[in-house]
Image (cartoon, helix red, strand yellow):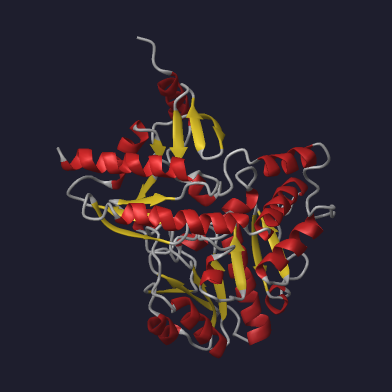
Amino acid sequence: MTPSLTAQALETELASLTRNYNPLPVVAASAKGAWVTDVEGKKYLDCLAAYSAVNFGHGNRTLIRAAKKQLGKVTLTSRAFSHNQLGPFAQELAALLGMDMVLPMNTGAEAVESAVKVARAWGYRIKGVPANKAKIIVAKENFHGRTISIVSFSTDESSRKDFGPFTPGFVSVPYGDAQALEKEIDANTVAVLLEPIQGEAGIIVPPKGYLKKVRAITKAKNVLMIADEIQSGLGRTGATVQCQNEKVMPDMFILGKALGGGIVPVSAVVGRREVMGVLKPGEHGSTFGGNPLAAAVGLAVVRMLAKGDMQKRSAKLGKHLRKRLEALVGKGLLAVRGVGLWAGIDVDPQLATGREVCEALMRKGVLAKDTHGSTIRLAPPIVVSKKDLDWGIDQLEAVLAELRSR
């Protein structure tokens, strides 16, 4: 019997790829808007959006147009030379967030590493922390990436086991506990690094007012506040960044994922001049960071967000998503969390694991991703229609009903 196109494609992958992922058995061949089509022609509603990297939909015409236009001109110069896309990208991105300066990179993890370096340099050069004594406070259950320095302050054992020794200089405190955070601050503390909403942990929303308390504490203690908005930013939560929903302005934003529009990897650290200005030529860099293609796509993303339509749509659809999901609590779901078009749902572990529910959803034509046992994240592209969103939730409701009837 001839294996299916999906089976053939997966077999080819398994033959050569390092097994650092355990994907659902779906092999995408094309995608448009909120829908993905596999190699056999089956369509799926994308409720993951590449962990929010595809906020504006697959094949967004505006962003594809910007990429194609730049492809025919110049795609890479390195930062040894300048190009005509970088200045406008940096200027308009900084303005969008009410900041002064931009440090362009490629991936989210690179941007986090860059923010850590900037914070340490600021601590030594501006605050006067003794050499090699800088301390950064982070939250437990965080997810900021998987480089060695970042997993050094992770509390996820699967991210740390067999990867030591680890980078020193980080202290973890419970997420959402401003008092615990304040107690850890000392004369050598240079920054507090937080996700405004913890994504990988299961879309964990901190107590109301938490971010404001952190901002007040860090200002009073002369400590930087760094907001990792890689997953929560760029329209996902009904605002340009989640900090805006909480009326908080940190010293640095970390952005990634959706900044590249799902086309190219683009990330950035965006911050105040007094902080970002500590870096000097030759102290930090990236061959591809801020390249012409990335800057052109990033600029198109920034200009799209400057209009505000995506944020409004996310907020409106998010309210509807939350209402539909909350109606399933007690019918297979234990809890629902989230802001905007981003939700974490806890499946009753007596019914199934999150992976099992995602596999059942896949069979019904919905793509979602589990995390931490029985928790599932839902983050459809912001361009999803209300009709399609309802259809996707209907499939979840059907899966839960089937599991309850077993």
> Which image quadrant is residue 388 in?
top left
Q: Nearer the viewer, residue 328 or 35?
A: 328
Is 93 on the left-hand or right-hand side of 378?
A: right
Q: Is residue 8 left or right of residue 360?
A: right
Q: Residue at x 58, y 87 (%)?
A: 222
- In percent of width and height, residue 336 lies at 33, 58
Indicate the quadrant where residue 286 lies: bottom right
User: Residue 62, percent across and down?
Assistant: 70, 43
**In this rendering, does residue 172 appear at all?**
yes
Return the x and y of residue 303 as percentages of the image width and height.
Answer: 71, 55
Compared with residue 15, is residue 51 higher up or lower down, i.e. above or below? below
| Rendered view: 255 above or below 249 | above
Q: Where's the C terminus, which quadrant?
A: top left
* Number of numbered markers: 0
| Residue 263 relative to residue 101: left or right | left
**Residue 53 percent across, percent down from the top left:** 55, 49
338 vs 136, nearest the viewer:
338
> In the figure, is residue 222 to the left or right of 45?
right
Where 320 falls versus 356 (above or below)? below
| Residue at the image position 58 percent from the left and 75 percent from the top | 250
Would you place residue 118 above or below residue 266 in this image? below
Residue closer to the observer: 339 or 76:
339
Name the quarter where the N terminus is drawn: top left
Question: In the rendered image, is residue 341 in sight?
Answer: no
